[in-house]
Amino acid sequence: MLNFTVTFFITIVNFLVLYLVLRKLLFKPVTNFMDARAKKIKDALSDAAIMKGQAEELAARYEGLMAKADAEAERLVKEGEDRAREEAKASLTKQPPMQPRRGAGERKPPSASARRLARNSLAT
């Protein structure tokens, strides 16, 4: 049969005292720490969600601005090409008639400095 002695009851009292002391000194601080940590994580997640929304809004705004800039660049390039084409046509219509080319027998007379250079090189 079971034999309950005084040590058994002392052990039970010892466990109850240990439980109460640990509950007061350990369980409450650990529970408070875990609650604070959970609150901090929850706050960080809500801040991250807000920042993500702001980032998406900025990205959409950026894409809109880039689309406008691309459209403006295309318009300017097309406008420049059209303008260059018109100026080229205008310059072709205003161009003076071409001078006839000099033939092989026709030469431009040498300048005075070219004649001096030739004389000096022959003299030496």
Image: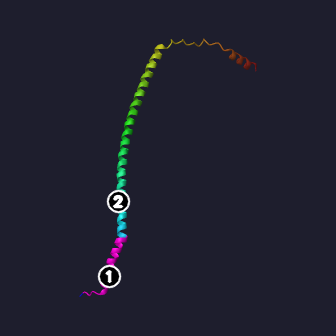
Residue visible at 43% across and 21% down in the picture: 85
Label drawn at residue 38: 2
Residue visible at 74% across and 19% down in the picture: 120
Q: Which residues are magenta?
A: 2-25
Identify the amino acid type marked 2.
Ala
Q: Nearer the viewer, residue 100 or 69?
A: 69
Q: Residue 39: x, y in percent?
A: 35, 58
Q: Categorize mark 1 by other alpha carbons within 10 Å: few (<14), some (14-19), many (20+).
A: few
Determine whether, in the image, residue 47 is placed left or right of residue 97.
left
Q: Nearer the viewer, residue 46 or 105?
A: 46
Q: Which residue is mark 1?
A: 11
Q: Quadrant of residue 118?
A: top right
Marks 1 and 2, the one that precedes in the sequence: 1
Looking at the image, the residue that sits furthest to the left is 1
Q: Categorize mark 2 by other alpha carbons within 10 Å: few (<14), some (14-19), many (20+).
A: few
- Which secondary structure, mark 2? helix
Q: Nearer the viewer, residue 2 or 6?
A: 6
Q: Residue 86: say if magenta.
A: no
Q: Height in image: 94 above or below 33?
A: above
Q: Quadrant of residue 76?
A: top left
Q: Name the chief secondary structure element in magenta.
A: helix
Residue visible at 75% across and 18% down in the picture: 123
